Image (cartoon, grey):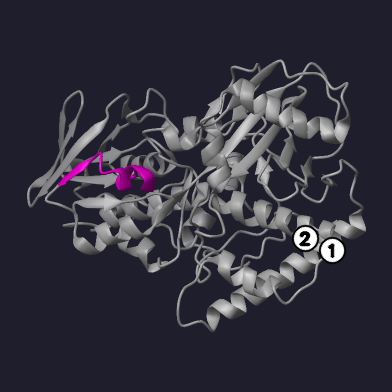
């Protein structure tokens, strides 16, 4: 069966960033450390971008303090163990293992990883019946052709349209059988809405396929992604529960005010999520340049929410890595990962994206569980057990994120990521996945952006 994720219609490439092939514990060379001992740097945010930047700077002799608003580190990498086994409620995968810097760290630190085989899944129709591999393959070919035509239409368009409008133009000229139509909608949801965290109506037809990717399979950390976070945090000075309120820059340095105190430094690297920058909760003095503020305003924050259900026993085929469920029009829970393959416990992880993911944040765990169980009983029958425990994410309600990751909406441009990455007064620098033109919305993109900004300071 065609792969769900590995066949994403994103451009693959063999040339990788210099950082990607060399990063690990072997940080920058000693000759860059000239006079750095006198320089103090504040890193705002203890997500992977901030920790990567702080570690790179500290290894080069800078005095570094990391300010983190939460009572934990990791940002949108968040491993929870309250169900009795590790569950990553934020980032889950190393996306593309070949030459990926996160994979390199995992190997260097002997952290166990396990691939997800997206070929090895099942799909159920809206009637609860299993769909044949032949029908799945043929529907994916239809989906791929639709996306190819959408890209061609966008390239020849003088005006940016939504991806939804572009696809609707294409579908008007096609006649699909009911099940084919449902399958195509499932692919659109899985490959785009969940993957980008945004509805097709909001995605730019010009830029929905932005960025590059690493080759190879996607890998999960069975014992938690926070192993990478904890490795990067070693020997760093990290001040938790320091919610930044104001950042003041001048020719002499940077002054940061939090809800618990004041901090001064020669420079600062801001690694806050785009959602926080868009919220206006942090005052910049003087205000950010108009082009940078414009980039913040134009970029959008998507959302991917997960629901994890722990059962008394498995009732789904345990050898499959996951399964999908088609629906008749309205959005519903349609994509499940077999988490028992990673936890050795009977558990499923459901994925949602876009407006549906936002809507379910208003529901209780009980309401969510009831809705998911209706979907599961449609496929596996009435006798299946109720979950023992249910956990779900609400990323748009997190004041330290306001969403999951960034995307380019209609009217935006990938150049906005470059504008967001530009330093202010050579003292205020910006990192994070939203600043990465090559690898937006990914852990490795955030990580490499932190290294990028640390190197900017080291070489200045």
Residue at (74, 44) in percent of width and height:
116
Assign the C terminus to one quadrant of the image. bottom left
Give x and y (percent) for residue 143. 73, 65
Where are the magenta residues, as a range?
271-284
Is residue 318 visible to us here? no
Using residue 111 as the reference point, say whether residue 418 is left or right of it: left
How crowded is the residue under tag 1: few (<14 C-alpha within 10 Å), some, or many (20+)? few
Is residue 144 visible to us here? yes
Q: In which quarter of the image is residue 53?
A: top left
Q: Please report contact status of discs 2 and 1: CB closer than 8 Å, yes or no.
A: yes
Residue 405, compared with residue 6, is above or below; it is above
Magenta stretch: includes residue 257: no
Using residue 41 as the reference point, say whether residue 196 is left or right of it: right
Give x and y (percent) for residue 394. 50, 32
Q: Residue 181 carries which label?
A: 2
In front here: 350 or 200?
200
Give x and y (percent) for residue 101. 54, 50
Residue 444, compared with residue 14, is above or below; it is above
């Amino acid at each position: 069966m065609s792969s769900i994720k590995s066949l994403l219609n994103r451009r693959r490439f063999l040339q990788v960033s210099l950082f990607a092939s060399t990063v690990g514990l072997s940080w920058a060379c000693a000759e860059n450390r000239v006079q750095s001992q006198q320089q103090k740097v504040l890193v705002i945010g203890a997500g992977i971008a901030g920790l990567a930047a702080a570690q790179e700077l500290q290894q080069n002799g800078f005095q570094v303090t990391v300010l983190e608003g939460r009572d934990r580190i990791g940002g949108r990498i968040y491993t929870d163990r309250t169900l009795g086994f590790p569950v990553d409620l934020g980032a889950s995968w190393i996306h593309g293992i070949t030459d990926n810097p996160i994979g390199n760290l995992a190997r260097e630190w002997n952290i166990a990883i396990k691939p997800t085989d997206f070929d090895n899944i099942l799909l159920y129709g809206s009637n609860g019946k299993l769909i044949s591999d032949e029908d799945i393959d043929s529907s994916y070919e239809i989906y791929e052709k639709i996306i190819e035509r959408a890209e061609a239409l966008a390239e020849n368009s003088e005006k940016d349209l939504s991806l939804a409008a572009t696809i609707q133009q294409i579908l008007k000229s096609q006649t699909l059988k009911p099940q084919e139509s449902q399958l195509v909608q499932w692919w659109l949801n899985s490959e785009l809405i969940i993957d980008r965290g945004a509805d097709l109506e909001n995605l730019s037809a010009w830029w929905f396929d932005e960025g590059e990717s690493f080759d190879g399979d996607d890998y999960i950390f069975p014992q938690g992604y926070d192993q990478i976070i904890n490795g990067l945090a070693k020997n760093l000075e990290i001040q938790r529960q320091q919610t930044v309120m104001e950042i003041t820059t001048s020719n002499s340095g940077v002054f940061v005010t939090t809800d618990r105190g004041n901090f001064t430094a020669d420079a600062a690297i801001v690694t806050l999520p785009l959602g926080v920058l868009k919220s206006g909760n942090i005052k910049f003095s003087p205000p950010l340049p108009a082009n940078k503020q414009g980039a913040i305003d134009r970029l959008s924050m998507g959302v991917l929410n997960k629901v994890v259900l722990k059962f008394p026993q498995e009732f789904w085929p345990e050898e499959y890595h996951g399964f999908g469920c088609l629906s008749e029009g309205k959005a519903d829970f349609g994509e499940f990962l077999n988490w028992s393959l990673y936890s050795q416990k009977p558990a499923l992880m459901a994925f949602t994206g876009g407006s549906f993911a936002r809507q379910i944040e208003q529901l209780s765990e009980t309401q969510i569980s009831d809705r998911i169980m209706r979907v599961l009983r449609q496929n596996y029958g009435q006798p299946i057990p109720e979950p023992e425990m249910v956990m779900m994410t609400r990323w748009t309600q997190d004041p330290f994120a306001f969403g999951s990751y960034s995307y380019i909406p209609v009217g935006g441009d990938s150049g906005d990521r470059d504008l967001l990455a530009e330093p202010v007064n050579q003292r205020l620098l910006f990192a994070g996945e939203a600043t990465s033109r090559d690898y937006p919305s990914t852990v490795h993109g955030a990580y490499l952006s932190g290294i990028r900004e640390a190197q900017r300071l080291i070489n200045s």
